[in-house]
Amino acid sequence: MERIEWGLLIVNYLYLGGLSAGVFFVSGLATYLKQNDGTGDSRIARYGAMIAPWPVSIGCIILIFDLGNWQRFYKLFLHFRIESPMSIGSWLLLLFSVVTLINFYAWLPEQKRNVAFLRLSKRIRSAERFNIDLSSWRRPLAAVGFPLSLGVGIYTGVLLGAVQARPFWNTNLVAQLFLFSALSTGCALLLVFLSLNRKSLEDSQIRFLYTLDICFIIVELFIALPYVIHGELSVKAVQDSLQLIMGGSYTLAFWVFFLGMGLLVPLALEVWEMLPVLRTKSPLKHNKLLTASAAFLILIGGYLLRYIFVYAGQKSAF
């Protein structure tokens, strides 16, 4: 009987880390594209900055408790080992988390920042001196955060690929698949927040997110399918491991729920919404229900991807 060492805690950690990476990347991109008058994509940039720190923070807390002796987690930061994926990932997550938190502060509205420091200064006298406007840091923080977010998105897949004894993971396509899944789920989470907001959505905002997400999903499909083809042409151990999704216990989850419901259906919905714009160049008249439905499917599909790979990978062995 196969022994499962990594369970749902690791699945959640991989998912939440990638989610923050995707949200920050899209938010940073919107930060560079937003107009000087504050319209256009500034809501996407602000929403992303407000959301990005929290999924990865929760994921890191989950990872710490999965270590067993959680109180010793600080030892990961007492040294740096370039040959250790775990060491590189730990420092990468730390730097990314710090940047997302500073970026969160930089995008915090002045009124809310003043209220927060007013309350804090009642307990800590010197707190008010840290009430600094960092809005001018937004673009530099986005520039610093771009490579860090991509690194975190890739690392969630590298962590699995580094385990060479598991043929289901033993290809660099896993890291690429996890990266573009992270970017797509980041777009999806922002679409959910924008759709649930009572304020009307601007045409440019939805078009921006739809365009990005369609590109990310297409690339994800072009990685997922070669992953299967590459495995079928690889050594026998890899071919045997692929049977888990080619008739085995994870076939339905991979082909129907992840690939079908998590990628193809939302791709079709988003393309359907964008078709009038592409044909006539008219303003995008999107349906909030379709937007939210496509986004939720992407989020569920991204989680299923990590669930399938974590569990199926542990059932495969050379």
Image (cartoon, rainbow, N blue to C red):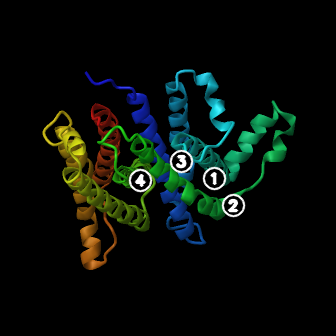
Tell me the kind of residue under disc 4.
Answer: Leu
Sequence-wise, the earlier of marks 3 and 2 is 3
Left or right: 234 with respect to 36? left
Give the quadrant of the N terminus.
top left
Is residue 34 visible in this depiction of the protein? Answer: no
Toward which corner of the image does residue 210 lie, by quadrant? bottom left
Label 1 near label 2: C-beta < 8 Å? yes
* Amino acid at pointer 2: Trp
Q: Amino acid at mark 1?
A: Asn
Task: Compare residues 202 and 157 and report the one nearer the observer.
Answer: 157
In the picture of the structure, the residue carrying the numbered disc 4 is 179
Label 4 crowd (10 A; few <14 / some 14-19 / many >=20)? many
Alpha-carbon span between mark 3 and mark 2? 16 Å
Res 103 label: 1
Point 43% across, 29% down: residue: 9
Q: Residue 2, how many percent across, how many down?
A: 28, 25
Residue mark closest to the camera, 4 vs 2: 4
Query: Residue at label 3?
Result: 52
Residue bearing the label numbered 2: 137
Query: Upstream in the sequence, badge 3 or badge 1?
Result: 3
